[in-house]
Amino acid sequence: MIRSFADMDRLASEKGPKRLVVLAPEDEEFMLAVRDSAAMGYTRPVLIGDREKMERLADQVQYDISSAEKIYEKSRQTIADLGIRMLFSGEVDIAGKGQIPTAYIYRAIIREESKAGKGKVVSVISMWDIEGLEHLTCFTDTGVNITPDYRAKAEIVRNAVFFFHLLGYPKPKICVLSGKREVNGDIPSYQDFLALKKAAAAGELGACEVMEATSFIDIFSPGKTDFRLRDIRIGRTDFPHIMLVPNLATGNILVKLDFALKNVRRRSLVMSSRGPVIIPSRSDFRDSILGEIAAGVTVAEQIKGGGAS
Amino acid sequence: MMTSFEQIRREAKAKDKKRLVVAPVTAATDLSTLTAAMADGLVFPVLVGDGKAAASWLGREKIPAAHLEIIEEPDEAKALTLAIGMVKNGAAEILLRGGMDPKRFFEAILDREKGLLKERVASVVSVFDPPGVDRVTMATDTYVNSFPSIAEKITITENVIKLAGVLGLASPKIAALSAIEQVNPAIPSTMDAAILSKMAERRQFGDVTLEGPLDIDCAVSRRAATRKGVHSPVTGQGDIYLMPNVEAGFLMAELSVFIGKTPMACALMGVSRPVVLNLPFVPAENRATEIDLAVLLCGRL
C-alpha cells in the first residue's frame, strides 16, 4: 500500500524511468522539474512544444535536451492532442501538462476516451499527504466538472476508487462532502450523498464504503455539540481516502488550501483509462511539479503491475 | 487595527459592560463561555428559560445571584420571542443562542418583522486567527446563504466590510474567490466576482480593494499569483475572502479548523443587534471571542 508521497518518491526511483510526454514545457519551473525527474531516474521525457522556447529554457536551466526526443509544435491544441494520443497508443506511460490551458488537455483526453469506446467522465484527483495521517487522501473532482450531477459524481467516485485500488487500498472510504448545515434544509449535494450511499451499498461504485460523514465536523467530532482544537488528532480519526467535492469552485478552494496550511502537501492527476496525466497548477513550483511526476511514475507502474500490495 | 483574538478581547474589555440575554436556557445549555465573559466584566447576563437549569448553573459555577437576572419562561419559543423583544427595545444589547437548535433559532431571528433581520440578507463571517500570521482574516458567507445571487453577494460584502470596520480595518483587502482567476461564463461565480470587483473599483463599497475572480492560490500566495500573471495588492495580503457559495464557505471554514487547527470565531452580520450563534463548528476555545465580537458590534450595526 502506498501511504505517503515519500512512498511514491521511493517507488518512482526504484521503478523508473517511465516514458513521460511533456506538453509544452515552456516555463522555467516546469523545465527544472522535468530535468530533475530525468536526472533522478524517474522519467525519459519526450518534449512537445515551441522549439525556440524549449531550447532557450533548457539552456537557461542547464538541461541538456540534445538526446531527449523532441516534437516541435506551436499550436496548443495540437500539442495536447499529440501528447494524449501518444499516451493512449502506449508510446508513453505518462503525460504531463506544461504551459498549456488545462481545457485543451481535458478535451484531448475526452476525445481519446471516446475513440477507445470508454466514454468515461474525466476527473481530476488531487491527493493530499497530511502530516500525522497514516494514509493518502484525495479530493475529487477538482478540475473538470463545474457542477456535476449525480451520474457524473458516481463516475467521479468510480475513477477515484479505481485509483485507490491501484495504490493498494482494497476498500477505500469515501466522504461525500456537502455544505449541508443545521439551517436551510437539504441541498443537492446532500441528496447526492444519500443516493451515492445506496449505490455503494449495492456495489455499483466498486469495492468501497461511503461514510456517514458529509463534512469535517462529522469526521472529527461526530454527534458532539462541542470540541476543542487542542484535542484534534488526525491520526486517531477515521479519515476518508476519497473526498468527493460538491462542485468545482469548492474543490479548487479546498484542495489548494495547501498554500495556506503548513501540514499538507498536494499532488494532482487525471486517471485516464490508459494511464495518468499529471496536471500541475499553473501556480505550482519545481518541487511540487517534480512530486507530481513521481506520482505519475508510481501510478504508471501500478497499472503495469496490477496494483500495489 | 485588531490583529489577534487576544487583542479583540482587550478591546472588548475596554468597553462598558453589556446586557446579554441568553435564550432559551434549557437543561442542555452549555453556559461555560458566559462564566469567562462575566469574569472579565464583559457582560451582565439575563437568562430566559428554564429557571431551574439557570439556578443549577449558578450554583455549580458559584456565581452570586446578584450578578445576573433570571426570567422564568419554560416554553422555548416564547423565551426566544421575549429575548428578541428585549434586544429590540433596548432592555438588553446582545442575544446569545441558548439550548434551541440553530434551525429554529435562525427562523426566529431572521424574520424581517418579528426578528432582527436588517439588511437584504444576514450572513455569517468566520474570523480566523491563523497561527504565525500577523493579522486576523475573515471568510464569508460560511453558514447562512446556500447559493447567494449577485444581489445577495453585494449585501454579504457590505456586511463583512462593516465588521472589518469594527475591527479597525479601515481599507480592507478583499478576495472574491472562485474556481479560477479568469472570468468564465461557464462558471457563474467568476462573473459575480468580476462584478463585485468592478463595483469596488467604482468605490461602491467605499474604501476597499476588492479583487476577483481569484482562485485560492492567487489569493493566499503572492508568489503563486505572480507565477500566474495576476498582479494585485490583494494577492497574499487578503483580509477578507468572499466565498462563491456556502459549500465552499462552510467546508473551507471547517477544513481550516480541523486540519489547519486554525482558531475561528463567527459573527452574524446583516442583523440589527449583535447575536452570538454558538454554532457547532466553532471550537470551544474560541466561543469567548464570539462574545467579544458581539460586544464590539454593539451600537455599530
Image (cartoon, rainbow, N blue to C red):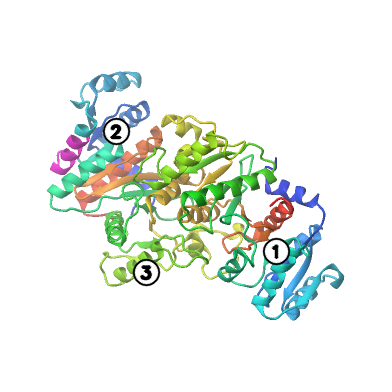
What is the spatial separation of the Cα atoms under label 3 and label 2, in whole angstroms? Answer: 38 Å
Residue type for callout 1: Leu
Q: Which residues are magenta?
A: A80-92
The residue marked by circle 1 belongs to what chain?
B
How far from the left and from the top, in percent, is residue A254? 45, 49
Q: Residues within 10 Å of mark 1 (few under 14, many from 20)?
A: many
The residue marked by circle 2 belongs to what chain?
A
* For residue B104, side relative to residue B39 (left or right): left
Q: Which residue is mark 3?
A: A194
Q: Residue at x 29, y 50 (%)?
A: A123
Q: Which residue is mark 1?
A: B95
Q: Residues within 10 Å of mark 3 (few under 14, many from 20)?
A: some
Residue type for callout 3: Leu
Q: Quadrant of residue A229?
A: bottom right
Image quarter (top left, top right, bottom left or bottom right) of the N terminus of chain B? top right
Q: Nearer the viewer, mark 1 or mark 2?
A: 1
Residue A52 appearing in the image: yes
Q: Across the whole image, how many numbered discs are drawn on residues? A: 3
What is the spatial separation of the Cα atoms under label 1 and label 2, in whole angstroms? Answer: 54 Å
What is the spatial separation of the Cα atoms under label 3 and label 1, in whole angstroms? Answer: 36 Å
